[in-house]
Amino acid sequence: MKPVQIKPDIFWVGAVDWAARDFHGYVIPNGTTYNNYLVRDEHPTLVDTVKSEFADEALEGLRGLIDPALIRNVIVNHIENDHLGALDRVMALCPEAAVYTTERGKKGMARFFDISRWDVRTVKSGDEIATGRYTLRFVETPMLHWPDSMVTWVKEAGLLISQDAFGQHYASAARFDDEFVRANGLVALEDAVIDYYANILMPFGNLIRTTLGQLEKLGIAPDMIAPDHGVIWRGDPGRVLKLYRNLVDGKADRRVTVVYDTMWKGTEMMTRAIAQGIMDEGVDCVVLKMRATPMSVAVKEIAKSRGMLLGSPTLNNDIFPSMAGFAAYLRGLRPRDRVAGAYGCYGWGGGAVKRLTEELKGMKLEVVEPGIEVHYRPSAEDRERCYAFGRQFAARVKEYHRKYE
Ligand code: FEO
């Protein structure tokens, strides 16, 4: 991809990964981008690199702007492989450049590369370097989302290079939010932000709230936010800040996401009756069959919904494997501020509903008990019970949702 100027003498020099569908096990239906940025100043500075297999493409773009041997500073905001991966290729071209990262970044970097011949300098929040017309200020953001993480504030440009924060996994021709919205609509962009947040950043909601406050206290009011994935926010950077505040504050739609799997259609029949009950109570409902849905998509829908129901048949006295895997994935992401419940069919003996309910209680969600179980296959009477359960669950969602309105 050709570089794109984003501010005077500051360029996007990344790569678009149109083909990616799997990001370390997390399904990304729309691909992604690896963004890095060149500050072509008196002391040329590269902020972040790209995933190693995209090094040639990114370096070709870089060479169109500058001889890489002239680069004096390389900033490493985050040492995950998708941003650090091409660092050795960059350093081979400018071995005298100083590398700036956090203390933890340096320790981690040494696990990936032989850094003994590089001039690696550690920085703390508030440290600055001058590149000429620009000043780069670093703010540590530990656990957002790795211990080493930091962001780079380019004061004179009003530009926050935010690393993974505010990013989206979406490959598109658009480099900026306004271009993306024109081509794909605002809903698609917000959906991509929520997907990214839900699957990567959700466990760190409280830390994100603190960091947003910290940035404000430091007087960082960006007119452009440039993340390391997806589009750069120039049209309305306040939009993504507001969206993040809503997410960390537990905002969601008055809606129920039902995620289920089924062996011989019994749990599926229950699902249909429960969903009808939810809808008849006046609450929106999304139904996803686990075996036909990537976990990341189900998590995104849960992040958008005030209520979640998990349906699973019992297999060998336990949760059906696809749903057990989903529960484990969900547990790690630590959803909050949600009403939850479980249901399912069993043959010889129950187990799945009890185990799923324990999982949901372990996540400290507002659990509606008891869950509903059906022996073998729902009769007409069972389907009535399921319908009533759906209505009862939706009523709890409506009541719980009021405190967020
Ligand atoms: Fe995009 Fe945490 O790496």
Image: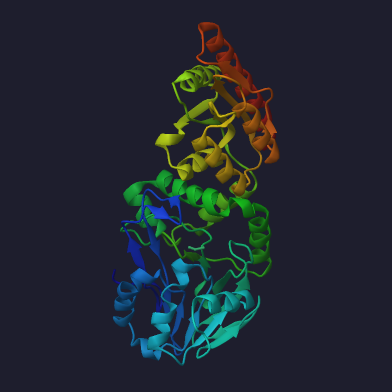
In the picture shown, does residue 311 fall above or below 373? below
Percent x, y of residue 41: 43, 86
Which residue is depicted at the point 54% across and 66% down?
222
Percent x, y of residue 380: 51, 7
* Quarter occupied by the C terminus: top right
207 and 78: which is toward the camera: 78
Which residue is depicted at the point 41% across and 59% down?
230
351 and 277: which is toward the camera: 351
- Which residue occupies the extreme bottom position in the image? 96
* Any part of residue 84 in sight: yes
Which residue is depicted at the point 68% across and 54% down?
206
Colour mode?
rainbow
* Quarter occupied by the N terminus: bottom left
In the picture shown, does residue 304 fall above or below 196? above
Percent x, y of residue 216: 65, 64
Percent x, y of residue 278: 55, 21
In the picture shown, does residue 61 fall above or below 251? below
Where residue 347 sits, quadrant-wise, is top right
